[in-house]
Amino acid sequence: MELLTDINVRRTTQSKIAEVDFADLEFGKHISDHMLVCDYVRGEWKTPHIVPFGNLVANPSTLALHYGQTVFEGMKAFRMNDGRINVFRMEKHYKRFVRSLERMCMAVVPKEIFVEGITRLVQLDQAWIPEQQGNALYIRPVVFASEAKFGVKVAEEYRFIIFTGPVPALYADPIRVKVERDYIRAARGGTGYAKCGGNYGGAFLPTLQARQQGYDQVLWTDARENRFIEESGMMNVFFVINDTLVTPPLSDSILDGITRDSLLTIARDLAYKTEERPVSVEELKNAFATGAITEAFGAGTAAVVAPIGTIGIDGEDYALPAYTKMSISSRLKLKIDRLRSGREEDRFNWNYII
């Protein structure tokens, strides 16, 4: 594609790719050779630069360190069957990025800098894209308030960074989750729909406590009554109840997941019955008692689909049936994998080929 934005590039003189064992990747461990940096100063975004990945220098009074103006996205690039590179659902990721920035009162990154910055960066570090099926190059765009001033205020200066790193597929085996009745992830009117740092830091303590009790993650409930299921860990959540794929409806306390949207679209295309509606804890208990629930799984960029094997509710564990290739979650994951890799026609125009 013809680039509309000037991006200055300074290549590394010493690649670290030889340090990576692509046959045994660990999520988040390795970062590719380069990063994009672009600053917002005096009301405008400056020329982006791609430079060797390295540490940042920050003033201790940098506003993001004190008042939480930080927003990020999580995306993936894939090596397709024919050797081309696909950044999955670029457009929808950008729109969510904008919504998050607007909610946090931050300067919005122009679309051409976002799209072309990712394009140039992935092209430059394309050797880091894993070849193994299911693995990917994770892309992390992030904006933070870079202004150095310790008074409580909306920042007037921001830094936009994109870096990437090779990652494996996650959660191949079913996980154990616990319904969280005390702590909450987000409240109505808050920032739950935004990908801002505070949403994640606030979830660490209840998640740690759940892991100490033998679970992998928590099922968050609503802030008002702790009665309705909202998300699974940092993922959206799906249930198969009476042969219907059910997921909680979007709200300002639930993240508008790109994978969630993709799975719903594919499920409807495959003629599965779907419902976006509230799911109460009591409904889950009754569904287990009657055998109406046959699957539960998380959905997110990192894992795509994370099958749930056990749900802990009020001190009692409820087991789900074993997952097979015929499970709805398995079929949906296979479909999305085939679409992203080019093994199946992209009828939804989701693949951004570079």
Image (cartoon, rainbow, N blue to C red):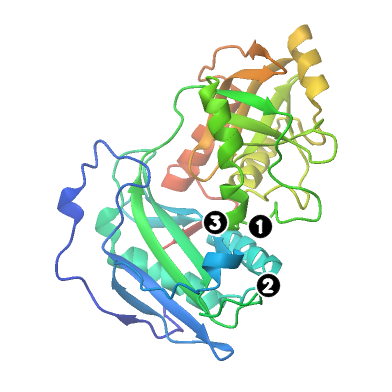
Identify the residue at image location x=65%, y=18%.
312
Kind of residue at disc 1: Ala
**Mark 3 — residue?**
89
Q: Quadrant of residue 289?
A: top right
Identify the residue at image location x=57%, y=59%.
93
Identify the residue at image location x=73%, y=12%.
288
Q: Nearer the viewer, residue 259 or 192?
A: 192
**Mark 1 — residue?**
194
Kind of residue at disc 2: Cys
Q: Are marks 1 and 3 in contact (CB under 8 Å)?
A: no
**Mark 2 — residue?**
105
With 48 as the anchor, is 72 left or right in this view? right
Q: Residues within 10 Å of mark 1 (few under 14, many from 20)?
A: many
Marks 2 and 1, how far apart at CA: 11 Å
Q: Quadrant of residue 225?
A: top right
Q: Nearer the viewer, residue 258 or 103?
A: 103
Of marks 2 and 3, the one in the foreground:
2
Of marks 1 and 3, the one in the foreground:
1
Q: Are marks 2 and 3 in contact (CB under 8 Å)?
A: no
Q: Secondary structure at mark 2?
A: loop
Q: Secondary structure at mark 3?
A: loop
Tell me which numbered mark, 1 or 3, is placed earlier along the sequence.
3
Vertical order, 232 against 286 (above or below): below
Q: Residues within 10 Å of mark 2 (few under 14, many from 20)?
A: few
Identify the residue at image location x=61%, y=75%.
108
Give the image location of residue 187, x and y in percent.
Answer: 77, 48
Give the image location of residue 66, x and y in percent.
Answer: 56, 66
Vertical order, 26 against 156 (above or below): above
Tell me which numbered mark, 2 or 3, is placed earlier along the sequence.
3
Kind of residue at disc 3: Arg
